[in-house]
Image (cartoon, grey):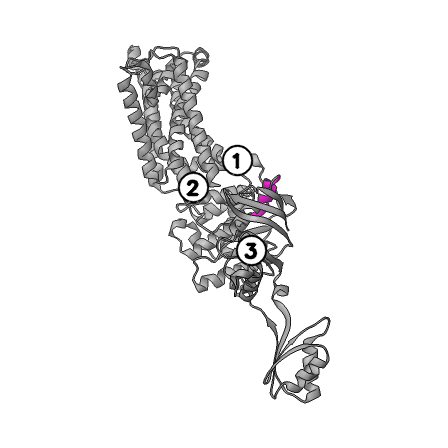
Amino acid sequence: MLEVDALHFSYGDFHALKGIDLSVPAGRIGLVGANGAGKTTLVRVLLGLAPADSGSAEVLGHDVASEPGAVQARVGFMPEGNCLPLEDSAAKFVAYAGELGGLPPSVARQRAADTLTIVGIDEERFRPIGTFSTGMTQRTKLAQAIVHSPELVFLDEPTAGLDPKGRAEMLSLINRLGDFGISVVFSTHVLTDIEATCDWIIMMDEGRILRSGPLAVAQDRHRVIAEFLEAAGPAAALLRSRGFEVDVDGRHLAVESTGDLDAFEAIMQAAVTNGLGVRSLAADRRSLEQLFLEQEAAFHPGDHP
Amino acid sequence: MTSEGAVFDLGYERYSGPRLGDREVFWRMVIDGLRKSVGIGKRARSKAFPFALLALAILPAIGVVVIQVVANIFGIPLGEELLLNAPEYFDWTAQLIFFFVAVAVPNLLIPDRVEGVLLVYTSRPPTINRYLVARLVAMAISVGTFLMVPQLVLLVGEGLISDNFFGHMVDNLAFWWRVPLAALFYLAVNVAAAAAIAAYVNNRGAAIAVYIIAMNVLSGVGFGLSSINRFFSLIAIQFWPPRLRDWIFDRPSPEEVPGTDVPVVAVLGTTLAFVALAVWLIMRRYRRLI
């Protein structure tokens, strides 16, 4: 879906993107990084709004530099800041956004009504957008981004300014986009939002890619935590003899999978062999925040003690 | 018949039907601009001003035709000075389009920019240049309507009360190129000035005020300084269109028009240079936004 090769972009002397390489499949993609990491700039380049200094980028099989129109006809964009006309009604503006995306006027009007209903704007759609709450504004922004049936939608900080309920509803809508057959690039600095919605993660820092890959793999350390009803020492000895790396702390065990050995199966066998009761058994998944900090530390070893 | 009902959430459906081409999307943008310039789809208050101006623009033409009809019926001879002709009619409509442009151009350009809507437009296939051209075409159509419709009313009305409608039309064939050409200069000068100001001022009220003040101050200064040197009259921006109109209609400019002794080529050159400068300033501003 996205193929990026040695992409550079500068604002004057400031290098916002420093040689980005990416290959990303269709799906729900999380684009994370601190403020100023280059997320919005990358999205703007991929949308064809800002021409790159060098390198190349393909979106949905079309080169962004030479075929910006072909890219823009197949994508939607929900900007971070204000992007709605305050005096127009949501129904009118979303229909017009559909027309700009190539929908015939009558189709655009019908789809605007349908799309606004899907995002939770019903009768309010005939009110001027200037009278909307933040939550309704964000929903209308999402509606204009998907009304023309894009294959991919870029969402730049879609949960910004929302209260917890509004945030949960927006994340639910983003999750539904996959069911609608729309791939998503979800740019945010809120890592828990990515954990709740995405299956692929791109981590950025200072204009570079720290990591790009499936979210499940990124979080999986092949580490299993077990708690026994009795002291875990005998089970640990058995597991070590089978080649596992094991940390013991009283009734707790942390077992690192190595090679093809299944830590879950091995812990259960060790418990049976030693007559131990198992209280709990779970994979030790890193939070995205831990993962991001690890990647950042690896990238800037001097900045972290 | 059943008393039970069910609600089905059909959800989001992908669209796979025909899509508009670039040209059709461009005209949708022009139509959007036309609606915004005359307040269609907005509160009645927004529509009142442009439609009142349009009515004021057409009424004298209707009045002139009615007077001629009545005079014909009662056999009253009418002096030429009582009747408006095409070039003189511009003096009336120019005042109206000055105020129409003052309000319509900021309405057309400023909200899209200040409210961030441009980002939505340009993330779609239309480019920023297409957006600006569409806005310009919308203004050209609405201002052109102000300038041309009264002239057509005058021409057709006089044709209808003449003995030979088609003969009258053929006799006034010159109308068909002189009036639009003169209208083009009124349109270009006013819209270029208003759009260049609206491109750099973020408040609609302020843009209207700056346009009205700038046009009047420049015209006043040019008029005042023309007694020192006739070429200072080239500063008087509001007098460029009437001077060019008189040149197009091949008639002497009235005494109150300053710079009548300045070669018309200088007025034409200044007008074209001004419009080119305004277009450059607008493009420069909008290129930086995207």
Front residue of A191/A236: it is A236
Specify few, some or many for label 1: CA neighbours under 10 Å numbering under 14, 14-19, or 20 or more.
many
Q: Of circles 3 and 1, which is in front? A: 3
Q: Of circles 2 and 1, which is in front? A: 2
Which amino acid type is marked by label 2? Arg
Q: Which chain is mark 2 on?
A: B
Which amino acid type is marked by label 1? Phe
State the image coordinates of residue A266 (x, y, percent, origin top left). 70, 79
Q: On the picture, is A288 further left or further right than B188? A: right
Q: Residue at x 73, y 71 (%)?
A: A260
User: From what the image shows, is residue B264 above or below residue B17?
Assistant: above
Specify few, some or many for label 3: CA neighbours under 10 Å numbering under 14, 14-19, or 20 or more.
many
Residue B113 numbered mark, or none: 2
Dots 3, 2 in contact, CB < 8 A: no
Q: Which residues are magenta?
A: A66-75
Specify few, some or many for label 2: CA neighbours under 10 Å numbering under 14, 14-19, or 20 or more.
some
Front residue of A34/B146: it is A34
Describe the element under mark 3 as helix, strand or loop.
strand
Describe the element under mark 2 as helix, strand or loop.
helix
User: From what the image shows, is residue B4 above or below residue B47?
Assistant: below
State the image coordinates of residue B26 (x, y, percent, origin top left). 52, 35
Which amino acid type is marked by label 3? Met
Q: Which chain is mark 1 on?
A: B
Q: Is residue A7 magenta?
A: no
State the image coordinates of residue B66 (x, y, percent, origin top left). 32, 20
| Disc 3 target residue | A204
| Disc 1 target residue | B26
Q: Which chain is mark 3 on?
A: A
